[in-house]
Image (tube, rainbow, N blue to C red):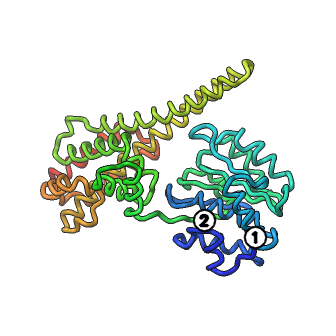
Amino acid sequence: MAVASISDVDAALPGIAGHPHARAVLGAGLGPRGRPSHAYLLHGPAGAGKRRIARALAAALLADGAGDEEMARAVAARVQRGAHPDLTWVRPSGAAEMLVSDIDEPVVAAATRTPFEAQRRVFVIEAAETLNEQAANRLLKTLEEPPAYAHLVLVSDRREEVMATIASRCVHVRFDARSAEAIARELRAQGCADEARARACARLALGDAGRARMLAGEEGRALRRASEGYVRSALEGETGERRWAELLAAATAAGASAGEQVEERLARELELALSRERRKLEREAQDARRRVQRRARARALDRGLALVELWLRDVMCVREGARELAYAVDRMGELEADARARGSVARAGVELVRETRARIASNVGEELALEALAYRLQALAEG
């Protein structure tokens, strides 16, 4: 498939025009003179369109050399259906973790075999940040010394969590966030009846459609309630209520929910396991649950503190007369009350929250850090 001009790249990769960095990087690898990389890492917020572009890229790579345009369209149609023999699409089988079995035969072993009918083989690996250490190590050699015909396309919503050894061997392709307006429309279409809440969740998600969906759901409502209660009680001098315990409880509940999902998935796998393998699988299942639960809890706590930071930022915007810049548009009454009473300390409060997030990320005790932040916010408000 001969792709050269920008218009041809846009036609080959529908939706790429909204992502200039991705368009430039991927477009350079297509066409008669293009030299596609053997490993790409497509990264950006959930809902940005990475998976759609990954499938289109796979179609363009597999159609190269297919002949005329009609044959190229036939290849693309088969790729869309997931029916092309030279395309392998890998998703985590461990619910929230990519296991060795997901990578070993489907990618590492398969990459040593020549294509069935195309000039290339393409392997798309979703949720690359979930590769556990063993799976990442298995993939590493293929990334370091790929066969000439093999192309690996890794996709991640959280590039910072992709193992450095994996990320460093890929060409990075950045996808930009969708607009808050587009995400809000999607939330309304998915059943969020409250327009103001849909807009608030979309704006608070900072372009991450997956996070917006979480905020609009039960887990997100609990996290928002805990975060807003925590920061408002601290500013009002009510630290004796220990509202940080509610924030920790919301994070713990998110971790437990993620752990239960993993346990349910692994329980189904254990039912099919041979008796001699059961004990080993049970031990691995417990380890996997603990890892997933710990990561989910830490992520939820950081998201909670991010909401605290955004609340203070909104208070600052309202105080300065820029209400239209506020994110939590469904809480405007509360923001106005805080702006009148404590707005002058909001900017300094944002810095304290950022400092606390960094400390917790460095393994400082969570409860102690949250308690200290609450008292420091109170001292600011009283000062």
- Can residue 274 be seen from the camera position used here? yes
First in sequence: mark 2 vs mark 1:
1
Q: Are marks 2 and 1 in contact (CB under 8 Å)?
A: no
Label 2 amino acid? Val
Q: What element does badge 2 sit on?
A: strand
Residue at figure coordinates x 64%, y 74% from the top left: 9
Could you tell whether 286 is left or right of 186 in the image? right
Residue at figure coordinates x 18%, y 63% from the top left: 319
Label 1 sits on residue: 70
Q: Which numbered disc, 2 or 1, marks the residue closer to the eye?
A: 1
Of the pair 236 and 78, the residue shown nearer to us? 78
* Residue 376 image offset from top left, x and y in percent: 25, 47
Q: Which mark is residue 173?
A: 2
* Residue 247 image offset from top left, x and y in percent: 33, 39
Residue 226: quarter of image: top left
Label 1 amino acid? Glu
Quadrant for the N terminus, please: bottom right
Q: What element does badge 1 sit on?
A: helix
Of the pair 252 and 213, the residue shown nearer to us? 213
* Residue 91 image offset from top left, x and y in percent: 64, 46
Q: Which mark is residue 22?
A: none
Could you tell whether 271 is left or right of 255 in the image? right
Could you tell whether 140 is left or right of 20 in the image? right
